Image (cartoon, rainbow, N blue to C red):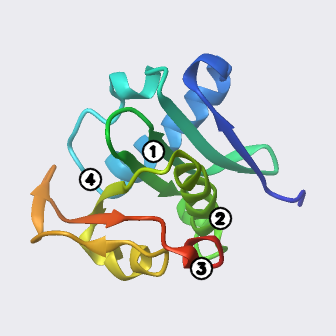
Amino acid sequence: MTDPQVFVLTPQNMTAVQMQRALQLRVSVFVAEQGIVCEEIDDLDRAETTEHIWLEADGAVVSVLRLLLDGPVIRIGRVATHAAHRRRGYSDRLMRVALDRAADAGRPVEIHAQAYLERWYEKFGFERTGPDFLEEGVDHVPMTWRGHPQAATA
């Protein structure tokens, strides 16, 4: 097995194959595995201010997230890891990369976290900012990160 490699690219700098593999993983996790009925792929995936961050192991995309850099806050979303590759710290690694990039921008970061993952996000310095709500039929929690120093070492 080769060492996993992290990629950070805007849609304009990704190859069609890279984009397809990243989006396929998201559909596999959110739609097929979790049964979320939604339009998983949207216009934000192609926006110039979007960065796709993913990790490849042995040539396969195994963990992904999306960083939306436009507006007064940065948004992290679509965090997903292939079932066979969980509990290896891959999503942790991607979150650290995303938060390092957000810290450079100097703006708060917001997420709509699936509620069962609230504690996982807290370890990066995210704080709950409101009550639970339903999004696409799944219980979510609004959370914000304001640049806590532990994010780089969580």
What residue sits right under mark 1 in the picture?
26
The residue where tag 3 is placed is 154
Q: Residue at image x 48%, y 65%? A: 147
Which amino acid type is shown beneath numbered disc 4?
Gly
Q: Where in the figure is residue 9, as x and y percent of width and height?
A: 64, 32
Which of the marked residues, 4 or 1, is nearer the chain's N terminus?
A: 1
Amino acid under disc 1: Arg
Question: Residue 60, position in %: x, y?
Answer: 72, 45
On the image, the x and y values in percent for residue 69 come to 44, 37
Mark closest to the chain's N terminus, 2 or 1: 1
Residue linked to disc 2: 93
How far apart, in angstroms, are the residues tagged by discs 4 and 2?
A: 26 Å
User: In this figure, what is the number of numbered marks?
Assistant: 4
Q: Under tag 2, what secondary structure? A: helix
**Mark closer to the chain start, 2 or 3:** 2
Which residue carries the number 4 mark? 35
Question: Is residue 120 shown above or below 33?
Answer: below
Category of crowding for the residue at label 2, using alpha-carbon neighbours closer than 10 angstroms: few (below 14), some (14–19), many (at least 20): some
Q: What kind of residue is marked 2?
A: Arg
The residue sitting at 26% across, 53% down in the picture is 35
